[in-house]
Amino acid sequence: MGLIEDIQAAVKDAMKKKEKLRLGVLRMLMSELKNRKIELQRELEEADILQVITRMVKQRHDAAEQFGKGGREELAAREREEIEVLEGYLPEGLSASELEALVKAAIAECGAESRKDMGRVMKAVMPKVAGRADGKQVNQLVSRLLG
């Protein structure tokens, strides 16, 4: 069963169990996936789905941070609860050593020697780590290894 089917089944399950928060988050996710499908004008692949979920998690992290700074802790807590629901559909994150190994392999594959080659390395690494590592984290690692 594909990821979209899993999400659709989870929507039905949340409806039956009357889990309002989970149901709302999953419906929002389905809406985002539908919009992405229309935008791309093709069926979504696993990488596309993970990209949408990752973007939604990042948005919620940013919102929780802003609510926390603004003294709205109840809203920040809700955002963190939504993050938990969404992260359930992301693959297990990469450890630091696994990520470093992937980056080193990409550097060797591209023949990168300096920071000028950073774009090529990032282009090679990002599809391999989609949904399993933060782009900012990958960027910092690539920069450190090339610098």
Image (cartoon, rainbow, N blue to C red):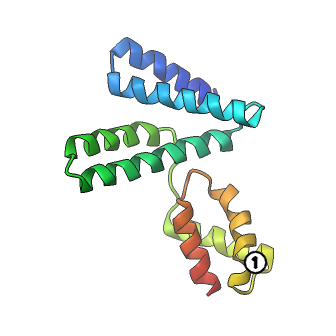
Q: How many marks?
A: 1
Of all residues, the one furthest to the front in this rendering is: 70
Residue 122 placement: quadrant = bottom right
Residue at the disc numbered 1: 108
The relative height of residue 61 versus residue 142 in the rendered view (above or below) is above
- State the quadrant of the C terminus: bottom right
Q: Is residue 105 left or right of residue 142?
A: right
Q: Is residue 68 left or right of residue 94?
A: left
Residue at position x 28%, y 45% from top? 76
At which x and y percent is residue 43?
75, 30
At which x and y percent is residue 20?
33, 22
Q: Which SS class for mark 1? A: helix
At which x and y percent is residue 63?
37, 48
Q: Is residue 101 left or right of residue 86?
A: right
The relative height of residue 88 versus residue 115 in the rendered view (above or below) is above
Of all residues, the one furthest to the top in this rendering is: 16
Residue at position x 67%, y 42% from top? 48
Residue at position x 69%, y 76% from top? 118
Tell me the amino acid under the disc marked 1: Ala
Decide which of 126, 55 is in the foreground and name it: 55
Residue 34 placement: quadrant = top right
At which x and y percent is residue 127?
69, 56
Query: Label 1: few (<14), some or many (≥20) within 10 Å?
Result: few
Residue 132 placement: quadrant = bottom right
- State the quadrant of the N terminus: top right
